């Protein structure tokens, strides 16, 4: 049996960042995860950090690698009607975003916790939680049964959270939307096709042209959620992607060998409340968003920024009301992000059953965004992130 102040289920970026922030204030924590460190490092996820997320990594001493290895993007291209229209973040709101893979964020955080002597236990099994104790029970990677007793329990254990299920049905509200399309994603060994992200609306459906490194790129195109990636040859994939970005300006993609193919379903989800007694939820355990607005990882980091602050006040300053602030403060940003992600998604994707009116309305909306400083500024503010 181990005793600590905060028990954290989930050693992804949310759980590790919370553990790191707590340690800076002298608050002890134990983090557990059923995945091994290698498994988490090799799970490809989002790659865009808001300005405040990048600053959080640097300013709290996690790592400055994002400044050295990441790539600042000062805008994006909205492409429709076969032409690209740049949204200049730097000119509009004075901020940039950073292209920096979530796997690198995880590595930086895992290294920081190891460097600082943090108690992080990967590869555990048979995990269960007791919110009344509170406690975490599990079998460690050596097969030994363990129990961690704590003052506060945090569920940062992803969209299939076991902690979220502990909130009684009588007091919880789950808001959910599943979208009628998915993304077919690839990683290709090829030079970059554009210096910044390209969001393309086309009669054939949406496409996103992203980057990963100088030699490996990530691209997506809208597809049916039941699409089988194995049924698509490389030639067919490239033909579809090229068709989605084609236009009179002659823009084409740099092609190369495709090393990975996946289908990513779209969901919006919010669990309320984010606190029940001594249990607090953070990141995907409490909410998920479509990837169109690049908000998932950033929401998780902002959750734990707020959570670390209220836990410090509750445990170190005997402020018994501090924990009550967490849910309302976090949810204010969560619902703004839900709206922004929904707006970006429905503006750019081909909607099932859409009429000619619907398509022309979408094009009118896109023209309004790129043709108006106010419209462009709204997109820039949402994409780069609202101030913490």
Image: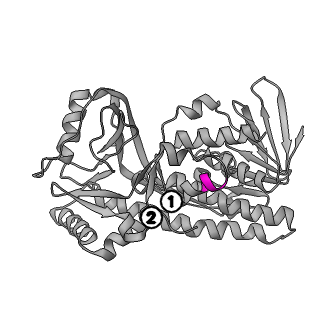
The residue singled out by tag 2 in the image is 95
State left or right for residue 6 relative to residue 347: right
Label 2 – label 1 distance at C-alpha: 7 Å
Instruction: Measuring from the top left, give residue 357's x and y in whole percent.
Output: 17, 66
Q: How many marks?
A: 2
Report the residue at 27% width, 61% height from top. 86
Q: What element does badge 1 sit on?
A: helix
Q: Disc number at residue 294? A: none
Instruction: Measuring from the top left, give residue 208's x and y in whole percent.
Output: 31, 48
Position of residue 276 relative to residue 19, above or below, is below
Q: Nearer the viewer, residue 352 or 310?
A: 310
Q: What element does badge 2 sit on?
A: loop
Q: Nearer the viewer, residue 66 or 258?
A: 66
Residues under numbered marks 2 and 1 in contact, where contact means CB atoms less than 8 Å apart: yes
Q: Disc number at residue 51? A: 1
Name the quarter where the N terminus is drawn: top right
State left or right for residue 346 relative to residue 107: left
The earlier-in-sequence mark between 2 and 1 is 1
Q: Residue furthest left?
A: 248
Instruction: Measuring from the top left, give residue 318's x and y in whole percent.
Output: 87, 68
Q: Residues within 10 Å of mark 2 (few under 14, many from 20)?
A: many
State left or right for residue 106 relative to residue 135: left
Residue 101 seen in the figure:
no
Report the residue at 50% width, 59% height from top. 51
Prevailing secondary structure class for the magenta stretch in the rendered image: helix
Instruction: Measuring from the top left, give residue 296's x and y in whole percent.
Output: 51, 53
Q: Which stretch is magenta?
A: 56-60
Q: Quadrant of residue 216?
A: top left
Report the residue at 75% width, 65% height from top. 310
- Magenta region includes residue 375: no
């Amino acid at each position: 049996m181990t005793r600590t102040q905060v028990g954290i289920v989930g050693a992804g970026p949310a759980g590790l960042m919370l553990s790191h922030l707590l340690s800076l204030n002298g608050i002890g924590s134990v983090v557990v995860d059923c995945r091994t460190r290698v498994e988490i490092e090799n799970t490809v996820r989002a790659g865009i950090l808001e300005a405040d997320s990048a600053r959080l990594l640097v300013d709290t001493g996690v790592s400055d690698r994002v400044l050295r290895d990441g790539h600042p993007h000062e805008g994006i291209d909205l492409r429709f009607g076969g032409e690209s229209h740049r949204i200049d973040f730097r000119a509009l709101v004075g901020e940039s975003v950073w292209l920096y893979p979530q796997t690198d964020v995880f590595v930086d955080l895992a290294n920081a916790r190891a460097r600082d002597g943090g108690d992080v236990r990967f590869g555990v099994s048979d995990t269960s939680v007791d919110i009344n104790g509170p406690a975490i029970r599990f079998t460690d990677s050596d097969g030994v049964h363990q129990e961690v007793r704590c003052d506060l329990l945090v569920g940062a254990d992803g969209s299939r959270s076991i902690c979220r299920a502990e909130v009684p049905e009588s007091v919880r509200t789950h808001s959910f939307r599943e979208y009628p399309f998915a993304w077919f994603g690839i990683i290709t060994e090829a030079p970059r096709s554009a210096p910044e992200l390209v969001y393309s609306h086309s009669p054939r459906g949406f496409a996103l042209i992203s980057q990963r490194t100088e030699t490996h790129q990530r691209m997506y195109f809208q597809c049916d959620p039941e699409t089988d990636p194995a049924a698509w040859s490389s030639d067919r994939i490239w033909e579809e992607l090229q068709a989605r970005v084609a236009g009179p300006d002659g823009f084409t993609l740099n092609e190369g060998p495709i090393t990975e193919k996946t289908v990513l379903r779209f969901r919006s989800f919010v669990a309320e409340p984010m606190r029940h007694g001594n249990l607090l939820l953070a990141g995907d355990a409490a909410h998920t968003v479509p990837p169109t607005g690049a908000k998932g990882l950033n929401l998780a980091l902002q959750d734990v920024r707020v959570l670390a602050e209220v836990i410090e006040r509750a445990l170190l300053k005997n402020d018994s009301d501090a924990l009550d602030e967490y849910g309302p403060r976090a949810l204010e940003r969560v619902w703004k992000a839900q709206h922004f992600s929904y707006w970006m998604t429905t503006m750019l994707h081909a909607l099932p059953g859409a009429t000619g009116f619907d398509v022309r309305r979408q094009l009118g909306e896109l023209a309004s965004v790129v043709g108006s400083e106010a419209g462009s500024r709204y997109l820039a503010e949402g994409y780069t992130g609202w101030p913490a």
